[in-house]
Amino acid sequence: MRKENIIYVGIDLHKETHTAVMLDCWNQKLGEITIENKPAEFHKLTRKVSRFVTEEKTPVYGLENAYGYGRTLRCG
């Protein structure tokens, strides 16, 4: 897979909220979203990321390790 075909999704985890930033391989910010740390909110993240996903583009997720606040977050 070529780096040009990856959408990088970095997620900053907190007790009450999660903030995700989507970047391309040139470090250009494509989007950002903050959601509540509740499973019922997680679809908002996947919907936001899906705006940038095409046949050629694949998302890669990176989660900050923050006291287990993201343990209920499941991507993909």
Image: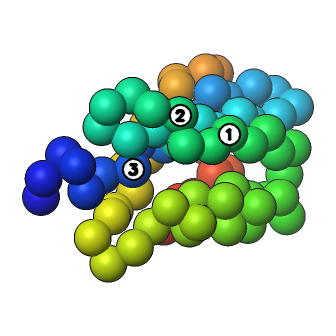
Residue at numbered disc 2: 29
Image quarter of residue 31: top right
Who's the residue at 83% across and 58% down the image?
41
The foreground one among 22 and 60 is: 22
Residue 13 x, y percent position in the rendering = 67, 29
| Pointer 1 with pointer 2, Cβ within 8 A | yes
Image quarter of residue 33: top right
As helix, strand or loop, the secondary structure at mark 3 comes to strand
Residue at numbered disc 3: 7
Q: Say which amino acid is labelled 3.
A: Ile
Q: Is residue 48 left or right of residue 61?
A: right
What's the distance in space between the residues labelled 2 and 3, CA to CA? 10 Å
What's the distance in space between the residues labelled 1 and 3, CA to CA? 12 Å
Residue 7 x, y percent position in the rendering = 39, 50
Labels 1, 2: front one: 2
Among the two numbered marks 1 and 3 on one chain, the one whose residue lies closer to the N terminus: 3
| Pointer 2 with pointer 3, Cβ within 8 A | no
Query: Which mark, residue 32?
Result: 1
